[in-house]
Image (cartoon, grey):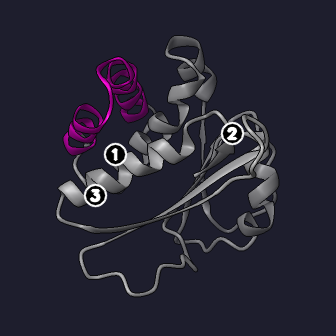
Amino acid sequence: IAGSAGQKVKSAATLLARAGMLSGLEATQKDDYPITVMTGHSLSEINLSPKPIEYTAIDNPDYFAVISEDGLKKTRKWIGRLPETCTLYVDESLEIPDTRARVRRIGLSRVIKEIGKLSVSVAIVAAIVADGKFIDAQTLEQAVIRFQSPTVAQANLKAVQMGLGLAG
């Protein structure tokens, strides 16, 4: 998941990892963001597997999401190398480089308008979960309820539902 600082990319990735663990999967998470506060990119890599994960790098991702211009700038070179087996979720406003990946353009402006920019990452995670079917959407909701404060969880449960609706 590649976005901007302040879009809660790391938090959404952690929810995905926790939902994976609640589903009995092994999980790793690697985050990349600058030391500046609320500026620049925010990138999280999640590896989920039914087997122990001994190699944590992700050479050929199954899913890749770009939700902001900052995220696109940071991952542009990777997008061009994505395999045809990867599904790339990208905000419909972004111009991406040529890629062999299957591209899913997602209208994230609606999520921002209805819920706020802090829930965009959760909505994209929900769309990936719905399309990928590697964990149950209800388990993602369970992770939101279990691991987030009630106020944050309320908004993110709406984001999960919107993301499920954005899945195709």
Q: Residues within 10 Å of mark 3 (few under 14, many from 20)?
A: many
Tell how many labels.
3
Which residue is at 52% across, 38% downward?
121
| Amino acid under disc 1 | Ala
**Residue nearest the viewer, comparing 108 with 39:** 39
| Amino acid under disc 3 | Gly
Q: Residues within 10 Å of mark 1 (few under 14, many from 20)?
A: many
Q: For the C terminus, which image quadrant? A: top left
In the rendered structure, find residue 5 and report the number of the disc placed on it.
Answer: 2
Alpha carbon separation for disc pair 1 and 3? 13 Å
**Residue 133 visible in the shown view:** no
Q: Nearer the viewer, mark 1 or mark 3?
A: 3
Specify start and end residues of the magenta stretch as a single range. 138-165
Task: Tell which residue pokes out farthest to the bottom in this image.
Answer: 54
Alpha carbon separation for disc pair 2 and 1? 25 Å
| Amino acid under disc 2 | Ala
Between discs 2 and 1, the one toward the N terminus:
2
In the rendered structure, find residue 130 and report the number of the disc placed on it.
Answer: 1
In the rendered structure, find residue 20 and report the number of the disc placed on it.
Answer: 3
Q: Could you tell whether 66 is left or right of 121 in the image?
A: right
Q: Nearer the viewer, mark 2 or mark 3?
A: 2
Between discs 2 and 3, the one toward the N terminus:
2
Q: Is residue 151 magenta?
A: yes
Most prominent secondary structure in the magenta stretch?
helix
Which residue is at 76% across, 50% downward?
72
Q: Position of residue 37 (x, y in %)?
A: 73, 38
Q: Is 85 rendered above or below residue 76?
A: below
Alpha carbon separation for disc pair 2 and 3? 24 Å
Q: Could you tell whether 32 is left or right of 167 in the image?
A: right
Q: Nearer the viewer, mark 2 or mark 1?
A: 2
In the rendered structure, find residue 152 and report the number of the disc placed on it.
Answer: none
